[in-house]
Image (cartoon, helix red, strand yellow):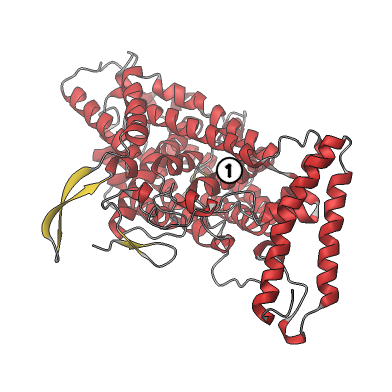
Amino acid sequence: MTLGRDSNGRDVDAFALEGPDTKREEETDTSTEGEERNKLAYCVTDVPPWYLCIILGIQHCLTAFGGIIAIPLILSGGLCLQYDGLTQSHLISTIFFVSGICTLLQVTFGVRLPILQGGTFTLLVPSLAMLSTPEWTCPAWTQNASLVNTSSPEFIEVWQSRMRALQGSIMVGSLFQVFVGFSGLIGFFMRFIGPLTIAPTISLIGLSLFDSAGTKAGHHWGISGMTTVLIILFSQYLRHIPVPFPTFSKEKRLHTTRVYIFQILPVLLGITLPWLICYILTICDVFPTEPNQYGHLARTDVKGDVVSRAPWITFPYPGQWGLPTVSLAGVVGILAGVISSMIESVGDYHACARLSGAPPPPKHAINRGIGIEGLGCLLAGAWGTGNGTTSYSENVGALGITKVGSRMVIIAGAVLLVAIGVFGKVAAIFTTIPSPVIGGMFLVMFGVIAAAGVSNLQAQSWNEGSWRGTKLTRKTPATRWRAETSTTFPLVSPLTCLRPPGCGTYRSALPVSPTPWTEQTPMPWSPSSGVDTNGLHRCLLQLLSELCTLAACSSAPSELTQNASEAALFAFPLLKTRVSTVKTIFGEKLT
């Protein structure tokens, strides 16, 4: 039974017979590209069946909802909303809705990688700092639940005035990110950012997030430990064990199909089972009912009143809290958060590309990604989420666990995020997942992120023992060609998978469009004018000159030999490609 299509147009059975990991082993291609592709169930350009996209999209939503929900809940204290659960649910619906829209824009027109967008903690710190200033400190009466009337005009004006100031600051700061992205400045900076800077950035992102993961997991270490163990068990040890499921087809009628469900849905299963156990233990009153006791936050009814009070249908819209205002102190703080978010996003792009079977993103893709993120922050500020958007590192980690890097899965997840934002009851239900379950999931995800950062060093030459060697790798034409066309990385998808829709190979007028340098190596000859011998000679002399330049930058004879060998290793395939192209065009006239 045909269930989907891969990037080459072949029919693919999502689960059948030999499993996703060995699906393409029938091919005899022994190249590195084929070997790397076999490690993924679905690559960035593959199209899984529609129902699998929905299931995996739900998994990505569940992976991201912890961070998405946490932001409004943390902001509620600074907005004087700690005793207004209904307004908190409205904020959650709004941030879900905007996250879905921003994800669709990023995957379709931005960096074109399977990366999910959501609220960012880098903007949370300056936001809380702004709300803690004397101008925006909450009145004393809002700290007493018995004195708060959530429907009174006075209380509504208290929190909405703070939200409007936050909205204006975020919108002004996002304009800077839009300018940096679409002007190509971030792409220019990427000339000086190589594996030696990307690897520690990604790793430190993952390691720094363990603080929040430990806080959530510490609410009940038994539940969080069970969640962590289940995700590791499903993704690492049970991934090759098929589970028989009844299926029906016209040819075989009713029969069983072996489904590698533990490889496809390890995170979803790892969350659902502890959530169900917490629900059973809550009904049996095993967990304490006192809020200050250990284990209380493992109950599923901690926020049960939110579900009953939330509306069935809600439509977030721009300016729903009023006309945004601008605070100078808030803008300065948000700008610092925006710069930090851009640096993290560049690292996330590289980690996502590696885990999804895509080539390292070129400068034009990074330009578009940062620009679209800035546009997403602008939309988030206009809608009134109290936050911006950024690439979600935990979802990048989910790609490495599930081995599914298809863009269609993230698109399905984005549509689900929009639906959750529209259906208020659904957004409220997600708030019932216990904090220890979220913390246990984060312990695994953030570890995968840190490991993905370290993996960027596997393509870096350890013999470049100085800053000069690192800079040479990024700026010398021969080695720049090697880095940008990703010949040092085993690829499973061509670089064209990162093009924006409708963009040709040679459309280079904008910094967000592919250029001939990043899409393919320009040829020094033209078929219409015959063989340009002088151009071919210039090509050969250029390669030899670059080889000598690379070797001359070494100070020791051993380094000279090593660098010359490295340059020759990547110069000769280029020369062979050019000669083969000439032979293809002109037959065997050129020998």
Q: Quadrant of residue 574?
A: bottom right
Q: Residue at x 59, y 71 (%)?
A: 503
Q: Quadrant of residue 337?
A: top right
Q: Residue at x 78, y 33 (%)?
A: 465
Element type where label 1 sits in the image = helix
Report which residue position mark 1 lands on: 165
Residue that extends furthest to the bottom in the rendered view of this protein: 528
- Residue in the foreground of this view, choosing between 498 and 67: 498
Please provide percent x and percent y for residue 476: 81, 52
Callout 1: few (<14), some (14-19), or many (20+) C-alpha neighbours within 10 Å?
many
Residue that extends furthest to the top in the rendered view of this protein: 293
Q: Residue at x 57, y 50 (%)?
A: 490
Please provide percent x and percent y for residue 530: 76, 84
Q: Residue type at mark 1: give it.
A: Ala
Q: Is residue 168 left or right of residue 261?
A: right
- Residue in the foreground of this view, choosing between 143 and 419: 419
Please provide percent x and percent y for residue 309: 26, 40
Please provide percent x and percent y for residue 201: 63, 35
Image label count: 1
